[in-house]
């Protein structure tokens, strides 16, 4: 009891079990115990801390006369070597979850991005103005925002697997419907059908992605950032492949084929996911989005997510126009400029996720410095006029590559940071909290995806791309500085609290130290005295 208390007060968890044993007869043989202790993987010496058992048990006294402390490794006390090796491997259930999540990330992003190369031209033929076309694109983010909040709140009631499969089924179906809109009469009927199909696609996409994120966090509780970062590669791949594939199919086969082909591929994934996706059940939670968002740390991270999403959205309507006007590139080469951003983000995201899970204390620095680097990228994207640097194509592509890496640095650690903050503040560890965090994450991303193109297009017309990009960088700079200031204040508050606890327990620690020295002296004296019998 004294040894365990001393370990707790010293902020050191005992990495072994201590037993008093008899020299003869009634207890464990000291020599055998010492020999077993030498081979024990959890004794104090020569073993990494990660292999030590996490629970502390009471010492047992077996009527000992020698008074010697022996550290013994009991069979079944923690993971044996073979178990440690197998725990590093993915289970069959985890592999199926990864396949399902990768399929929805890739398929949904391709369906989302396929419209860009040819839909505006077709919509103009049907009587839609540029403003209406922009609203058709923008309504996706708005309804994705609303649906993410609703599905995140009621994930447990609906069921994660059902929400995932149903969302994928509806998304594939409305993608096919988008392919037959050219048969609809032009004018208000065509515009109304475009809005209806696009809104339905946004709602189904929100359902599938919210369920996917929750299932991933449930299946990989200790590797959330690594898994999220790895699957962002499929999202980036979908964004990269969507426009060129859609443009090729449109030129070769017409308007219908790109949508019908992709929609059918997504629909074919539905029965596969129904078979392989595990069904997770949980009790409804008592917390709400409001209780989550009012946490200071979550509020600041929300600001970071929105700024990053708006930065990506800002580039959609403005960068292509700027490149065409500034460098006189053919329209086909504009997509290659975007490729630098998408590929760097897709490649760096798994690495950032792995680093975030292996060293969780680095998440705060990734969040802060990722935002600061992103701010610098937008300042140099034009570049901003006050920098007096001439705009060059190679510099633009380089900045986009760096921007993709810095965005991954800030975005990937955000989900596990919000999740850990929720658990620290009393949110239950279950599917209900995962649904809240997933829904909030999707909603915040949608806010930025709506604000970025809207404000970006307005600022581009009023002040030009250079100043508009600089203002977007100012948003990222503000979020990075605010996040850094919060972490500094949090660190200072924890140090002050630790100092108060240390000053409170220091007299007790001194008393225990003296008591341990006295007991140790008595034990040594008893061991040295000759046996009177």
Image (cartoon, grey):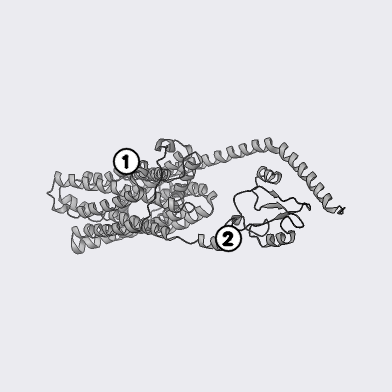
**Rendering coords of residue 165 (x, y %):** 31, 52
Dot 2 corresponds to which residue? 80
Give residue 346's quadrant in the image: bottom left
| Observer able to see residue 474 | no
| Residue toward you, 406 or 514 | 514
What label sits on residue 481 in the rendered view?
none
| Residue toward you, 215 or 181 | 215
Marks 2/1: CA–CA distance: 48 Å
| Residue toward you, 53 or 180 | 53
**Rendering coords of residue 64 (x, y %):** 76, 51
SS state under label 1: helix
Q: Is residue 130 left or right of residue 527?
A: left
Residue at left offset 58%, top offset 60%: 80
> Given the current orientation, which residue lies at the most extreme left position?
185
Residue at left offset 31%, top offset 58%: 335
Dot 1 corresponds to which residue? 146
Give residue 470's quadrant in the image: top left
Residue at left offset 65%, top offset 37%: 501
| Observer able to see residue 122 | yes
SS state under label 2: loop
């Amino acid at each position: 009891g004294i040894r365990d208390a001393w370990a707790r007060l010293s902020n050191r968890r005992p990495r072994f079990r201590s037993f008093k044993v008899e020299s003869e007869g009634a207890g464990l043989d000291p020599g055998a115990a010492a020999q077993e202790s030498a081979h024990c993987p959890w004794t104090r010496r020569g073993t990494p801390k990660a292999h030590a058992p996490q629970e502390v048990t009471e010492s047992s006294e077996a009527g000992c006369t020698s008074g010697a402390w022996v550290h013994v490794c009991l069979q079944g006390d923690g993971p044996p070597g073979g178990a440690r090796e197998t725990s590093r491997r993915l289970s069959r259930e985890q592999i199926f979850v990864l396949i399902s999540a990768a399929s929805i990330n890739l398929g949904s992003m391709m369906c989302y991005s396929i419209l860009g190369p040819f839909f505006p031209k077709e919509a103009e033929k049907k009587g839609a103005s540029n403003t209406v076309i922009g609203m058709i694109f923008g309504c996706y983010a708005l309804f994705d925002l609303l649906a993410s909040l609703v599905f995140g709140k009621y994930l447990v009631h609906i069921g994660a697997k059902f929400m995932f499969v149903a969302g994928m089924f509806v998304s594939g179906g409305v993608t096919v419907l988008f392919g037959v809109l050219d048969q609809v009469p032009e004018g208000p009927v065509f515009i109304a059908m475009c809005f209806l199909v696009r809104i339905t696609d946004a709602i189904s996409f929100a359902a599938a992605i919210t369920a996917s994120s929750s299932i991933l966090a449930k299946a990989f509780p200790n590797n959330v950032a690594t898994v999220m970062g790895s699957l962002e590669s499929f999202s980036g791949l979908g964004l990269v492949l969507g426009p060129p594939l859609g443009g090729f199919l449109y030129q070769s086969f017409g308007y219908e084929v790109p949508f019908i082909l992709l929609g059918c591929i997504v629909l074919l994934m539905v029965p596969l996911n129904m078979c392989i996706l595990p069904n997770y059940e949980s009790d409804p939670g008592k917390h709400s989005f409001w209780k989550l968002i009012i946490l200071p740390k979550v509020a600041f991270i929300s600001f970071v997510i929105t700024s990053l999403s708006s930065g990506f959205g800002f580039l959609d309507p403005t960068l292509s126009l700027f490149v065409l006007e500034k460098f006189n590139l053919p329209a086909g080469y504009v997509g290659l400029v975007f490729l630098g951003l998408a590929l760097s983000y897709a490649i760096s995201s798994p690495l950032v996720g792995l680093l975030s899970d292996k060293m969780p204390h680095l998440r705060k620095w990734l969040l802060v410095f990722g935002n600061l680097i992103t701010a610098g990228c937008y300042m140099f994207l034009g570049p901003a006029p006050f920098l007096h640097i001439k705009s060059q194509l190679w510099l633009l592509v380089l900045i986009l590559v760096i921007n993709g890496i810095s965005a991954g640095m800030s975005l990937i650690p955000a989900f596990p940071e919000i999740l850990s903050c929720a658990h620290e503040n009393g949110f239950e560890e279950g599917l209900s909290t995962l649904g809240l965090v997933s829904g909030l994450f999707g909603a915040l991303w949608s806010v930025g995806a709506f604000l970025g193109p809207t404000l970006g297009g307005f600022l581009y017309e009023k002040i030009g791309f250079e100043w508009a990009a600089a203002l977007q960088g100012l948003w990222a700079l503000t979020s990075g500085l605010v996040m850094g200031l919060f972490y500094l204040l949090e660190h200072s508050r924890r140090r002050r609290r630790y100092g108060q606890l240390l000053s409170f327990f220091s007299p007790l620690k001194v008393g225990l130290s003296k008591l341990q020295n006295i007991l140790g002296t008595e034990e040594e004296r008893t061991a040295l005295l000759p046996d009177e019998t």
